[in-house]
Image: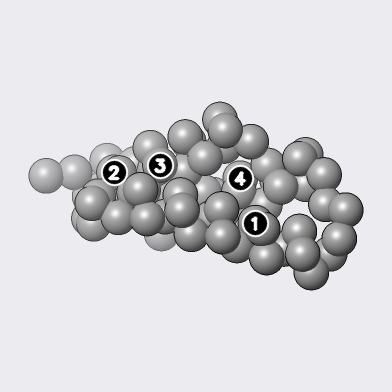
Amino acid sequence: MALELLDLARVAAHTQERRFAPLSCFMAGVATERLRAAKGGLDDAAVAEFILEVRQELEKEYPAGTNER
């Protein structure tokens, strides 16, 4: 799960608003814990998949190389 968060931070850091990379990871953690509470018994693999989906959506919105300064 830590690797997925680090990948999310990497992708977020390459968007137009790179300063929000730490916040995006924090919010992914908050969303993950809310998901665990709502679903009950969510395992680490499911959490990692959730974070991966968030990262992939972010990558679709900000493809690599299009927002670098």
- Residue at 57% from the left image edge and 33% from the top image edge: 2
Residue 46: horizontal and vertical position, in percent?
78, 47
Which quarter of the figure is the N terminus placed in? top right
**Identity of the residue furthest to the left in this view:** 69
Q: CA distance from mark 1 to mark 4?
A: 12 Å
Could you give the CA–CA distance between mark 4 and mark 2, rounded to whole angstroms?
16 Å
The answer to whether the residue labelled 3 contacts the one labelled 1, judged by CB atoms less than 8 Å apart, is no
Amino acid under disc 2: His
- N-term mark: 1 or 4: 1
The residue at which mark 3 appears reads as 9
Judge depth for marks 1 and 2 and give the one in front: 1
13 or 23: nearer the viewer: 23
Q: Residues within 10 Å of mark 2 (few under 14, many from 20)?
A: many
Q: What whole-number distance in Å separates the C-alpha atoms at marks 3 and 1?
A: 15 Å
User: In the structure shown, which secondary structural element does the residue marked by tag 2 occupy?
Assistant: loop
Identify the element where label 3 is drawn.
helix
Which callout, 3 or 1, points at the residue further toward the start of the chain?
A: 3
Q: Amino acid at mark 3?
A: Ala
Mark 1 sits on what residue? 32
Quadrant of the rendering where the C terminus is positioned? top left
Say whether residue 60 is visible.
no
Q: Callout 1, which amino acid?
A: Thr
Judge from the rendering whether residue 64 lies leftward or rightward of residue 49; answer left or right: left
Could you give the CA–CA distance between mark 1 and mark 2, rounded to whole angstroms? 23 Å
Residue appearing at x 60%, y 48% in the figure: 51
Name the spot of residue 3 as percent of width and height, x first.
56, 30
Q: Residues within 10 Å of mark 1 (few under 14, many from 20)?
A: some
Q: Nearer the viewer, mark 3 or mark 4?
A: 3
Q: Which residue is mark 4?
A: 52
- According to the picture, the residue beneath numbered tag 2 turns out to be 14
